Image (spheres, rainbow, N blue to C red):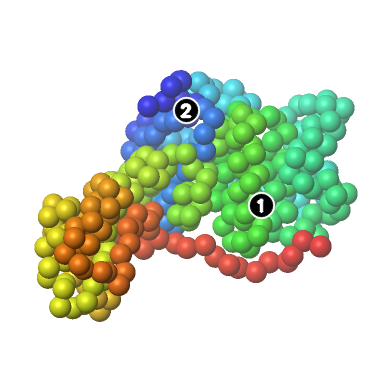
Amino acid sequence: MPTSEPIVEVRDVVRCFGQVRALDGVSLAFEPGIIYGLLGPNGAGKTTLIRVLATLLRPDRGTVRVAGVDVVADPTGARARIGLAGQFAAVDEFLTGRENVEMVGRLYGLSAAETRRRSDEVLARIGLTHAAGRQVGTYSGGMRRRLDLAASLVGRPQVMFLDEPTTGIDPRNRMELWELIEDLVRSGTTVLLTTQYLDEADRLAHRIGVIDRGTIVSEGTADELKDAVGGAVLQLRVADDRREEAVAILRRVSGEEATYLPRERHVRIPARHGSRTLLEAVRALDAVGIEPDDLALHKPSLDDVFLALTGEAATHALTEQEPQEP
Ligand SMILES: Nc1ncnc2c1ncn2[C@@H]1O[C@H](COP(=O)(O)OP(=O)(O)O)[C@@H](O)[C@H]1O
Ligand SMILES: [Mg+2]
């Protein structure tokens, strides 16, 4: 349970585009100081929700509060508390990195001196000081994303919205961005990020909301979501002539039905008590002299969760190429 007032609170939000119900009654709330991961396939409504949260789009129905401010009633107040970085970095090719960041500072109404000070600070923080004097046209995709992030940090937001921050960038830059996002949260910013990638949500998010067709279909920590799909599974392979005996033992130990997968020659059985079930199984098998060729405990992955909830296979990380940073 959240220990403080929620910093983001979305209630029954509906937003249609013509016939399309992009958001069909979304509700979610979370406390400050965490990374909240909004996980969903293409077209699920992630960007629409981010745009509503960032005051760029009015909801047809429902309420949205960010840092205690109603974004519809007081969009200016909300904007002063939030930062936004999108899937497509909104940076000007013809300006230098520093000029891009300073431009945003001036838009926030900061003085020239304050703008310069904060720009230095965020450029150092995202590791772009060395490239700050270069035109953005020469930057790699990863550097643009970082610059976009830096620009939104100039206003010192309480909450950052990151819409698919690592989509389409190479694995090395992806990991750098993950570290940057974790740094941000350590320094006190709350982050809501959207992603199509299970591994990203698993790695970064303290809490995850799975969104599909404009509604949140499940919510919790990565572990809670995995447990909801049925907890761990014990998998065993034994010699054919001992299989029936082994299955009977597993049934007794776990109290569940076993499944035999002939192709893999594996017996699978739910192991609700995880490693305790595993240990009991090992002891019981050993007592009758059964030595498994293979015995393993599997936690269901977020892939299993996603498949179970949305009936669709999940998206895996791209390994798309892009120019390397010089
Ligand atoms: N400006 C728009 N006009 C019409 N349809 C839109 C618009 N923006 C989004 N949609 C539709 O709303 C749904 C959700 O889109 P979006 O929020 O972009 O999903 P996601 O970001 O999860 O991929 C999709 O069916 C999309 O085609
Ligand atoms: Mg999107």
Q: Are marks 2 and 1 in contact (CB under 8 Å)?
A: no
Q: Position of residue 114 (x, y in %)?
A: 83, 27
The answer to whether residue 17 shows anywhere in this view is no
Q: Which residue is mark 1?
A: 176
Label 1 CB less than 8 angstroms from ligand 2: no
Quadrant, the C terminus: bottom right
Quadrant, the N terminus: top left
State whether residue 87 is above or below residue 117.
below
Left or right: 141 as drawn, with respect to 103: left
* Circle 2: residue type: Glu
Circle 2 — which element? loop
Q: Position of residue 282 (x, y in %)?
A: 25, 58
Disc tally is 2
Camera-nearest label, 2 or 1: 1
Q: Position of residue 65 (x, y in %)?
A: 47, 26
Q: Position of residue 232 (x, y in %)?
A: 29, 53
Left or right: 15 as drawn, with respect to 253: right
Circle 1 — which element? helix
The answer to whether residue 92 shows anywhere in this view is yes
* Circle 1: residue type: Glu
Q: Earlier in the sequence, mark 2 or mark 1?
A: 2
State whether residue 151 is above or below residue 284.
above
Q: Which residue is mark 2?
A: 31
Q: Label 1: how many residues lie within 10 Å, few (<14), some (14-19) or many (20+)?
A: some
